[in-house]
Amino acid sequence: MSGEQRLRKDNQAAIGIGTLIIFIAMVLVAAVAAGVLIQTSGFLQQKAASTGRESTEQVASGISVAQVVGHVDSVPGGKVDLLAIYIEPNAGSAGIDLNTAVLTLNNESVEAQFKYNSSFFVDQATSGYGNIFNTSLAAWRANISGTITNLGSTDFGIIVLQDADGSITQSYPTLNKGDKVIITVNASAAFNGIEERTDVSGELRPEFGAPGIIDFTTPPAYTDHVITLQ
């Protein structure tokens, strides 16, 4: 074999080895890239599933206002001094902690915000049903550190009407499927009473989920001590 032939074969061998090295490098790069893609797709899949669950919970969860009833202090010529807001969870809602809910009410001149005060709590579901506007109930008047105190202008209380699983306790009032609760508001303390022909709007907004909407106009004359407002 001549020197020229040997040189040609050496060059071909070198080219073959170089091609093999490039091929192996490409395989390694492709393997690394595939591993990164698989890892990323797995992370994105888990993230999408988690976001989907959170979005579904956010949309499905919430509070529904079933009714608003007012108590008039004197007939005729009086004002609505107490409000009872009947609420329940939306169908399919996750548990709602009323400790974190914020109630907002606007009577055209004052916008008031209320938070749950655990001192004002009555469980009629277990203690027996009665007049919800009986001001001796702890949802309106409570013994706090030995002092009888009325429900304040920034607090709301709770009367439990239905709670089969016992999820609504005084310290941890969690509203879930099948529960029915009355939110108590001292309108005298918050608004100096609500007069006739007054537009009242607001919402009970939980930590997550849809708020319960409150919107009513008081009648042109109060003829009864208890009136349905919404």
Image: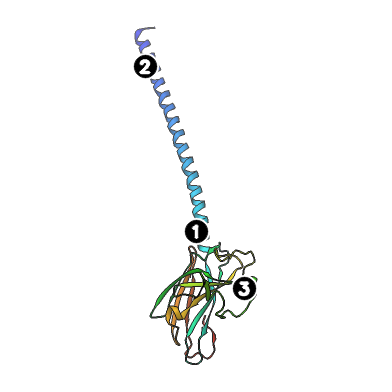
Q: Is residue 92 left or right of residue 32?
A: right
* Residue 55 badge: 1
Farthest top residue in view = 1
Question: Dividing the image into 4 quarters, which one contains the N terminus?
Answer: top left
Q: Which amino acid does label 1 sit on?
A: Ser
Residue placed at 48% from the left, 89% from the top? 78
Lower position in the chain sequence, tag 1 or tag 3? 1
Label 1, label 2: how far apart the Cα atoms are: 64 Å
Lower position in the chain sequence, tag 1 or tag 2? 2
Q: Quadrant of residue 171?
A: bottom right
Label 3, label 2: how far apart the Cα atoms are: 96 Å
Rendered position, 75 above or below 175: below
Q: Of 198 and 47, which appears nearest the observer?
A: 198
Farthest front residue in view = 146
The crowd level at tag 2 (other Cα within 10 Å; few <14, some 14-19, many 20+) is few
Which of label 1 and label 2 is nearer to you?
Answer: 1
Q: Name the residue under label 3.
A: 124
Label 1, label 3: how far apart the Cα atoms are: 35 Å
Which of label 1 and label 3 is nearer to you?
Answer: 3
Do the residues under discs 3 and 2 have CB atoms within 8 angstroms?
A: no
Q: Position of residue 160 (x, y in %)?
A: 59, 71
* Residue 165 badge: none
Q: Position of residue 187 (x, y in %)?
A: 46, 80
Residue placed at 43% from the left, 78% from the top? 190
Total numbered labels: 3
| Secondary element at image label 3 | helix
Q: Position of residue 97 (x, y in %)?
A: 52, 63
* Residue 11 badge: 2
Q: Which amino acid does label 3 sit on?
A: Gln
Q: Of 149 and 95, which appears nearest the observer?
A: 149
| Secondary element at image label 1 | helix
Q: Of 46 and 138, which appears nearest the observer?
A: 138
